[in-house]
Amino acid sequence: MTLHLDDLRVGHLGECRYGSPFSEMLSTKQTSPHYVAEGDRVLLEDTVSMLTEHGRPPEQVPSFEAAGPRRKIYFDPAHVTAGIVTCGGLCPGLNNVIRGLVQELAVHYKVKRILGFRHGLQGLTAEHRNDTIELTPDRVRDIHNVGGTILGSSRGGQDADEMVDSLVLQGINIMFVIGGDGGMRAATYLSEAIRARGLDIAVIGVPKTIDNDLPFTDQSFGFQSAFARAAEFISAVSVEAAASRNGVGIVKLMGRHSGFIASYAALSANGADIVLIPEIPFSLEGANGLLAHVEQHVRAKGFVVIVLAEGAGQDLLEEQGLPQHNGRGTDASGNVKLGNIGEVLKESITAHLTAVGLAPTMRYIDPGYAVRSVAANAYDSVYCLRLAHAAAHAAMAGHTEAAVARWRRRFVHVPLSLMTSRRNQVDPDGDLWMSVLETTCQPAEFGSAQDRERVHTGFC
């Protein structure tokens, strides 16, 4: 995708006429570096070759608007009612973002009222629009210590106009949507419906995806907490498999379309022999297939540990007509339901090893809920807080139809439409996957003779 500067501009409700409350907080400084200049931008690409390729003056090179507090803001804080909603699956850090938003809005901007809509975007429907909770600094003080979200969450395709009606009835001026690709799409539809009515309501997205698959962000919040927890399960299964006769350990992790959690968790635990992710196809049968590779591990060292992303091998299920579980149709957010590749691997590996006289002791675990429900670790706690601050600053300055993200170590404003324009995936030729191959010594592609000789050479 080729992007131009205009593609990276975010919406704005109008002229900023109010002095920021931060003027009082930083009144001891004549010129505070805490403020972000309106012209401050962060380059989309930061390599010399990419800048040279554009062949344009520096001010026309594609770049994101820098996030942060402005000297002048659009909304009068004394007349602002803000709304917050959390959408989609759980992820470490949701409560941290809620807490950060409430503290920044109430303490520093002194907004009039903050409402939390319950159970995702269902809370914006006519049936549930009054099922809101008042969010105050006291109410959210300690919520960062627990996982999940105090607002609840859900998936679904609610009507945009009905949701806008709810915002109008509740007197909402600013709406924060914390969600993944489905949540960012919903925020986009909501923004478009607001714009069509000519309403003065800002919509700011805080991207959330435990799979780390949203684009234009260095890393999704909660991702580090999630793969750290996942690594603990890999280590536990490794111990179990090693202590069992012909042990086979399989850990199935999140990753519908992207194998980041599986890759990072496997590298962290350093106990995986095989990592399977959606980006890399594999074959079961044949001299160089996965089953033969599993057999080789069991014969050589007595056990094998496989880390499996949930979206891996979906093409295999379809092509070979293997058993599938809930592998058809879509969920409430429009995501295609995946086939259960984990169950297929259990059955296939058990049958193969039994047939060659290595009847396995299977240790299979799917810790998805245990991983996504943990509280944010120290890194993610700080990251979520800073994202929340950036979102509050963006909204109060009148930005809309935008998400806040960190790009090249700076917090920036990204047009909502770009957040769902493509998917962030593990590059099969990139350094992350190369590190996985170097650590596991697995072949670059099961079904190919390539690199198979590296297995059990003493380096892994």
Image (cartoon, rainbow, N blue to C red):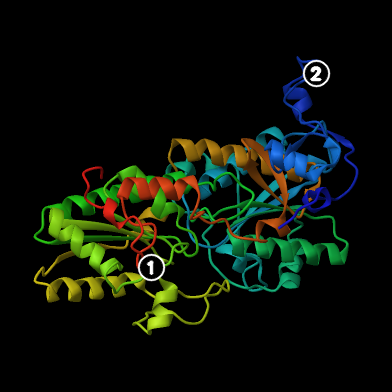
Residue that carries the numbered disc 1 in the rendered image: 282
Which residue is at 19% across, 58% downward? 297
Q: Where residue 310 sits in the image (x, y, percent)?
A: 40, 65
Q: Where residue 113 sits in the image (x, y, percent)?
A: 70, 47
SS of the residue under disc 2? loop
Q: Nearer the viewer, residue 429 or 409?
A: 429
User: 348 above or below 239?
Assistant: below
User: 290 above or below 266?
Assistant: below
Residue 297 located left or right of residue 142: left
Q: Quadrant of residue 442?
A: bottom left
In the rendering, which numbered label is found on residue 31? 2
Q: Where residue 95 sits in the image (x, y, percent)?
A: 51, 47
Q: Quadrant of residue 201?
A: bottom right
Residue 458 located left or right of residue 59: left
Residue type at mark 2: give it: Thr
- For label 1, count other residues whose C-alpha is less than 10 Å away and answer few (under 14), some (14-19) or many (20+): many
Which residue is at 79% across, 67% downward? 193
Label 2 vs 1, first from the N-terminus: 2
Depth-wise, is mark 2 or mark 1 nearer the camera? 1
- For label 2, count other residues whose C-alpha is less than 10 Å away and answer few (under 14), some (14-19) or many (20+): few
Q: Quadrant of residue 158?
A: bottom right
Q: Where residue 241 sits in the image (x, y, percent)?
A: 17, 56
Q: Quadrant of the C terminus?
A: top left
Q: Nearer the viewer, residue 279 or 367?
A: 279
Discs 2, 1 touching: Cβ within 8 Å? no
Which residue is at 52% across, 43% downward? 96
